[in-house]
Image (cartoon, rainbow, N blue to C red):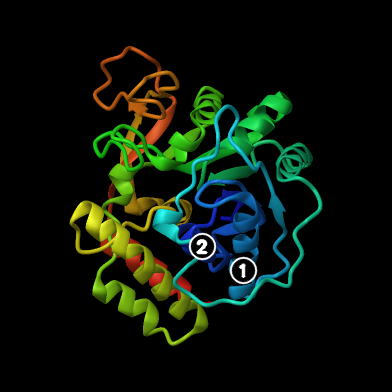
Amino acid sequence: MPPRRIIIDTDPGQDDAVAILLALASPEEIEVLGIVAVAGNVPLPLTARNARVVCELAGRPEVPVFAGCDRPLAQPLVTAEHVHGKTGLDGADLPEPHMPLQARHGVDFIIGTLRAEPSGTVSLCCLGPLTDIATAFTRAPDIVPRVQEIVLMGGAYFEVGNITPAAEFNIYVDPEAADIVFRSGVPLTVVPLDLTHRALTSAARVQAFRDLGTPVGRAVAGWTDFFERFDREKYGSQGAPLHDPCAIARLIAPGLFSGRFVNVVIETRGDYTRGMTVADWWRVSGRAPNATFLRELDAEGFFALLTERIGRL
């Protein structure tokens, strides 16, 4: 089969960076048409910088990187330096990028690409807040039926929230944008905390990255060591979940994942539940299914895939 053609929309973030590396290391399965940075884990100037840092680390400076939206649709930006550090990529000492940031706005790139390519041939892989995608859909509704699929890391049901008691970070940062995307009718695959919390690092798994003996392997190990400290303290676990690489791995090796096709809506008004991903796992609402909501992961298979692909770079 030809590779899936994707646009990555992301807010790097160490785990976003690992996801980008996984995509760039997998040309048999994935063709990355471009990367759009959005404000999220850190502000937009840093996410746009970090995306280019990762492309250069991978030896892929020809991949175009665009800056998207610098704030959510309807609320002030919430960031996560407490998790990812002041740069978003703390944990590895990497040089400033030389490759240029594209002059075109990231939303215009998304719109233009979906209009130019044959309908149903481009998927969107979303690793951060959904601001860029919602803006593109609102500005150019003709592109909505042209999207092959959206695979997004965000939300939770059984694991509830990681930034509030009810909400996962990516959805909480811009619930209005998420609401637009989930109501769009585009085929959706959701990679929630319920799934990513099964993708836990361990001392052995981190050491496997370091033992690759490459700059990329050392960077991945350093990033993982850095953000592990926060999740270990928060969850009391032995490692940290590698959230965003799961979304890319779903495109490469879908057999590692399972879930249910259910209805998912976004809470935008609740005093305590704003940004909550309301997944009708038990199919009790009567609302029509609109998303494949993943829950199960072959963690050993996932880390074997990730380590092998990182080793290619």
Rate crowding at label 2 as few (under 14), some (14 to 19) or many (20 or more) other CA atoms within 10 Å: many
Is residue 203 shown above or below 267? below
Q: Quadrant of the C terminus?
A: bottom right
Number of the label disc, if any, that sits on residue 53: 1
Q: Secondary structure at mark 2?
A: helix
- Residue 216 visible, this orientation: yes
Q: Secondary structure at mark 1?
A: helix
The residue located at (77%, 64%) in the rendering is 100
Label 1–label 2 contact, CB within 8 A: yes
Q: Is residue 92 left or right of residue 242?
A: right
Is residue 24 shown above or below 199? below
Q: Is residue 94 left or right of residue 276?
A: right
The residue located at (39%, 34%) in the rendering is 292
Q: Residue most toward the top?
A: 286
Q: Disc 1 to disc 2, how far (Cα)?
A: 9 Å
Relative image position of residue 78 (x, y in whole percent): 49, 41
Name the residue tied to disc 2. 17
138 or 232, which lies in front? 232
The residue located at (51%, 60%) in the rendering is 88
Q: Residue most toward the bottom?
A: 213
Relative image position of residue 170 (x, y in whole percent): 46, 41
- Residue 2 visible, this orientation: no
302 or 12, which lies in front? 12
The residue located at (51%, 33%) in the rendering is 174
Rate crowding at label 1 as few (under 14), some (14 to 19) or many (20 or more) other CA atoms within 10 Å: many
Instruction: Say whether disc 1 or disc 2 marks the residue closer to the N-terminus.
Output: 2
Relative image position of residue 116 (x, y in whole percent): 79, 41
